[in-house]
Image (spheres, helix red, strand yellow):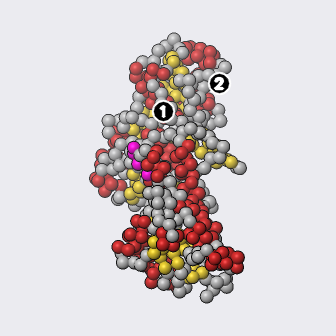
């Protein structure tokens, strides 16, 4: 028989099966046996197949050596790898097989020791992790994949149904196209596995190694990218947690932009210890608030800019109850994201068919590396996880901030950290008043933040993500009646800026830390 391109189909007469994840393996092996395929297996896999009534040949019978060293050595043998690597149409290879009693193996079914799952468990020791580094599995996968013209390599239970269908259609044979596709996936699998092991072993010893290896597993295709003419997909890192692994409880499928905005909103509320809510549009906060309840926090966030909140992303760092859900239902919202939801809140949200409801679980630490792609390369940096405390502030003006102003300054500083630079945030304790984001000039951000404010600016404080290069930003802010400013300091004109604050009777505190967000 031949495939659609007149290339001969490869019959699967002998298969070696050795799997950690035994999902679907009994049915797959039974189908192989129905096709007349001889099954060779190892250890626990052989035991499971025999218990299901299947005929199995032990790999030790094939090699003439027992499994040894707690299973570390069982398939690392010429009669396994020669059986996989030999080219069937190469007379010298065939002669070598005959001389050394090597029987060809036409299919390898292997999935690897669960290394990633092991290191993801709390309290796992380094010794336990190392024992889950698979050696024989990757070696067999690579041997079979290298010889994809003759050997099928199966590395994922999700591949079983399509292969069963093809084997049935082609009288226990597979096409060359299928063998190539399987080999491609196999090398992806071993590359991902090796990268995970390498990253774990390196630990924190080398944050920026000479070669940076990161792997991502596809979750789903997205309808389109930032714009309808762009294609897109969602991948996860496998590090555990995060938006890519969140549960979508109801509503339409998430879009590319939904994910980007939802992550920005979630990162913002995760920076607060108190009950917090943030409303985000185009990655910038339209409003943020703290409250005794999620509903109270949402009310403060919404009051900042009710117009921009329309069609926004709403994030909470606490479980959402019915009271908060009732308030949120009053205007159109694209996505709500929270650690969890009370049953009554979910019932309300499910009345809105288009509202995407995302459950995150507990807020995760935003540590590790942050990657940003540029043409021809990648920028890599540590994440901005800096937390500012009241005792870190250095007051540089003659006027000292009150306790209430300090609370407002610290709140505004956190929101400013999550606003695109140049970033200016007007705030009171626990509530944003106005946001000026992403302007080319800092004084323009000061003007826009005040212009956009729907709450009284007089009596509020101002947060700036970077220093003021001139006194014009201070003069403009004072014109709107603010009482205090928080900023990093560090400008060559700091004395001029401090003098301006003193002239206007403002308190000003330096943080010594900048929070640019590009």
What residue is pinned by disc 1?
A: 414
**Helix or strand or loop: what does disc 2 sit on?**
loop
Where is residue 4 drawn, in percent x and y?
Answer: 64, 84
Q: Residue at x 56, y 14 (%)?
A: 503
Where is residue 321 drawn, in percent x and y?
Answer: 31, 47
Vertical relation: 7 (above or below) 380: below
Q: Residue at x 62, y 60 (%)?
A: 230
Quarter placement of the C terminus: top right
Crowding near the residue tagged with mark 2, few <14, some 14–19, many ≥20 C-alpha atoms within 10 Å: some
**Helix or strand or loop: what does disc 1 sit on?**
helix
Front in this rendered view, residue 70 or 173: 70
Residue 440 visible, this orientation: yes
Front in this rendered view, residue 86 or 240: 86
Where is residue 115 drawn, in percent x and y?
Answer: 47, 54
Q: Residue at x 51, y 75 (%)?
A: 15
Residue 308 visible, this orientation: no
Is 515 one of the magenta-colored residues? Answer: no
Q: For the residues marked 2 and 1, what is the alpha-carbon distance in whole angstroms?
A: 21 Å
Front in this rendered view, residue 138 or 308: 138
Task: State the residue lying farthest toward the bottom.
Answer: 1
Q: Is residue 370 left or right of residue 30?
A: right
* Labels 2, 1: front one: 1
Region rendered in magenta: 118-123
Vertical relation: 124 (above or below) 422: below
Quarter placement of the N terminus: bottom right
Q: Residue at x 68, y 48 (%)?
A: 377
Where is residue 486 drawn, in percent x and y?
Answer: 52, 24
What residue is pinned by disc 2?
A: 469
Q: Is residue 343 left or right of residue 109?
A: left
N-terminal of the two: label 2 or label 1? 1
Front in this rendered view, residue 56 or 224: 56
| Count of numbered circles in the view | 2
């Amino acid at each position: 028989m031949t495939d659609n391109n007149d290339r001969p189909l490869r019959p699967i007469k002998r298969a070696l099966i050795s799997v950690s994840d035994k999902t679907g393996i009994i049915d797959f092996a039974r189908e192989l046996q129905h096709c007349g395929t001889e099954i060779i297996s190892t250890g626990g896999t052989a035991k499971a197949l025999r218990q299901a009534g299947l005929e199995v040949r032990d790999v030790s019978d094939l090699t003439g050596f027992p499994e040894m060293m707690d299973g570390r050595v069982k398939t690392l043998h010429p009669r396994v790898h020669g059986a996989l690597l030999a080219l069937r149409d190469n007379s010298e290879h065939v002669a070598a097989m005959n001389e050394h009693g090597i029987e060809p193996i036409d299919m390898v079914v292997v999935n690897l020791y669960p290394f990633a799952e092991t290191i993801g468990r709390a309290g796992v020791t380094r010794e336990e992790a190392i024992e889950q580094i698979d050696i024989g599995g990757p070696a067999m996968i690579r041997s079979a994949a290298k010889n994809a013209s003759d050997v099928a390599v199966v590395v994922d239970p999700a591949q079983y149904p399509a292969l069963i269908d093809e084997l049935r259609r082609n009288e226990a044979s597979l096409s060359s196209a299928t063998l190539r596709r399987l080999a491609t996936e196999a090398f992806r699998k071993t590359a991902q596995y090796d990268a995970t092991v390498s990253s774990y072993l390196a630990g924190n010893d080398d944050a920026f190694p000479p070669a940076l290896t990161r792997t991502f597993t596809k979750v789903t295709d997205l309808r389109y990218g930032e714009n309808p003419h762009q294609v897109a997909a969602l991948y996860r890192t496998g590090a555990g947690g995060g938006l890519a692994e969140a549960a979508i409880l109801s509503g339409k499928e998430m879009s590319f932009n939904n994910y980007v905005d939802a992550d920005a909103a979630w990162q913002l509320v995760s920076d607060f210890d108190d009950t917090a809510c943030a409303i985000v549009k185009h990655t910038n906060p339209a409003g943020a608030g703290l409250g005794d309840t999620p509903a109270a926090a949402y009310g403060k966030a919404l009051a900042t800019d009710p117009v921009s909140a329309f069609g926004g992303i709403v994030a909470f760092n606490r479980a959402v109850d019915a009271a908060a859900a009732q308030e949120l239902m009053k205007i159109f919202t694209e996505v709500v994201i929270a650690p969890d939801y009370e049953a009554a809140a979910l019932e309300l949200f499910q009345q809105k068919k288009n509202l995407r409801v995302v459950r995150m679980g507990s807020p995760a630490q935003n540590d590790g590396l942050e990657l940003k792609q540029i043409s021809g390369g990648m920028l890599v940096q540590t994440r901005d996880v800096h937390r500012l405390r009241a005792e870190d502030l250095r007051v540089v003006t003659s006027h000292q901030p009150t306790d209430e102003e300090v609370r407002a300054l610290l709140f505004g500083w956190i929101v400013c950290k999550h606003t695109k630079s140049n970033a200016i945030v007007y705030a009171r304790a626990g509530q944003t008043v106005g946001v000026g984001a992403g302007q080319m000039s800092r004084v323009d951000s000061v003007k826009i933040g005040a212009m956009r404010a729907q709450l009284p600016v007089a009596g509020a404080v101002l947060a700036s993500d970077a220093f003021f290069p001139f006194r014009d930003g201070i003069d403009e802010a004072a014109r709107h009646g603010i009482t205090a400013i928080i900023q990093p300091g560090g400008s060559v004109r700091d004395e001029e800026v401090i003098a301006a604050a003193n002239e206007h009777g403002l308190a000003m505190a330096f943080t010594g830390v900048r929070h640019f967000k590009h």
